[in-house]
Image: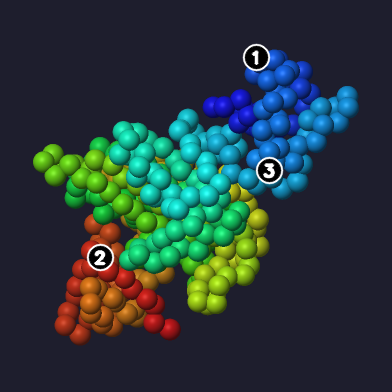
Amino acid sequence: MELKEEILKELKKSEYISGEELAKRLFVSRNSVWKAVKKLREEGYEISAVTNRGYCLKGDNDKISAGAIMRNAAREREFYILDEVSSTNDYARQLALDGRDEAVVIAETQKLGRGRLGRKFYSPKGCGLYMSILCRPRINVELAPLITSYTAVATALAIDSLCGAETKIKWVNDIYMNGKKLCGILTEAAFDFEGGTVDYVIIGIGINVTGREFPKDISDRASSIEKESGARISRNDLAAAILNNMDGMTEKIGLKDYLNIYREKSNVIGRSVKVMYGNSSFDAEAIDIDDNAALVVKTDDGVKKLNSGEVSIKI
């Protein structure tokens, strides 16, 4: 962890802390502390210096930082915190190609953020958590489709725990609250076909955390955690909660216990839906989600299991 991140972590613990005390705790010089504080200020953190009292972190200061995330994270990770990027998934993919085994990429905004089926993901600066997780889970190829469901549960529970309201999951990859979309998940993977295993996985999670206004083309269906729950939560705390919930995926994903929560949180089971599958569409009733996270639907032609595709809820 960089010195500036360690200092930020200490500043968040106390109302005031002197440069001398910071230097003593972190085993560095006073000048090193001053330089690190200067860097934090340049990054947008409001840090005041009061004579005889020390440094104080002011304002909301919800700027994404590895130090703030690690304050509540269960273990160390390699973070790449970016002000702007084309897509966090694209950045994480390059890290995978460069040989990284694990990394977390978070950006304040994305120029070309995307969701499933090539759709654009709205990523206004400072309003959301735009995070991609690179990992190399030791799992067989047949378990790979469950990664999105595992992530959806981990993300939904993290949001619930911080905002005090309940989320729902729309098969297969969206998190909703009060009928409005808060989050989309885009999972991409590379496979070792000879070994029948997953090489690497990139899990993109885009969450609308704050903000009350959205573009006209999505305003009828998109919202934010703040708007729907009334809670203004820390993006750093949210990132930490999701990462903690994601831990142990290699061991847990095959157990499928999380699918019980996935079903309980489903906002499609028992509803009439329109299914878009390839170039066709049809009406159906969603009746279950099976142990492979496939959506089970009932149609005029009988019961079908959907391993891919998309559904919209009929009003």
Three-letter amino acid code at the position of disc 3: Gly
Mark 2 burial class by Cα count in 10 Å: few <14, some 14-19, many 20+: some
Residue beneath the point at 23% across and 64% down: 307
- Residue picked out by circle 1: 27
Mark 1 burial class by Cα count in 10 Å: few <14, some 14-19, many 20+: few
- Residue picked out by circle 3: 44
Mark 3, mark 2: which one is toward the viewer?
3
Which quadrant: the C terminus? Answer: bottom left
- Label 1 vs 2, first from the N-terminus: 1
- Residue picked out by circle 2: 308
Distance between the alpha carbons at the discs numbered 3 and 1: 25 Å
Residue beneath the point at 62% across and 70% down: 213
| Whole-percent x, y for residue 125 in the image | 59, 56
In this orientation, does residue 160 appear? no
- Left or right: 258, with 126 as reference point: left
Q: Which mark is residue 196?
A: none
| Whole-percent x, y for residue 145 in the image | 26, 54
- What element does badge 1 sit on? loop
Distance between the alpha carbons at the discs numbered 3 and 2: 43 Å
Three-letter amino acid code at the position of disc 2: Ser
Distance between the alpha carbons at the discs numbered 1 and 2: 54 Å
Are the two marked residues, 3 and 2, in contact with CB atoms closer than 8 angstroms? no
- Left or right: 94, with 124 as reference point: left
Which quadrant: the N terminus? Answer: top right
- Label 3 vs 1, first from the N-terminus: 1
Three-letter amino acid code at the position of disc 1: Phe
- Left or right: 165, with 265 as reference point: right
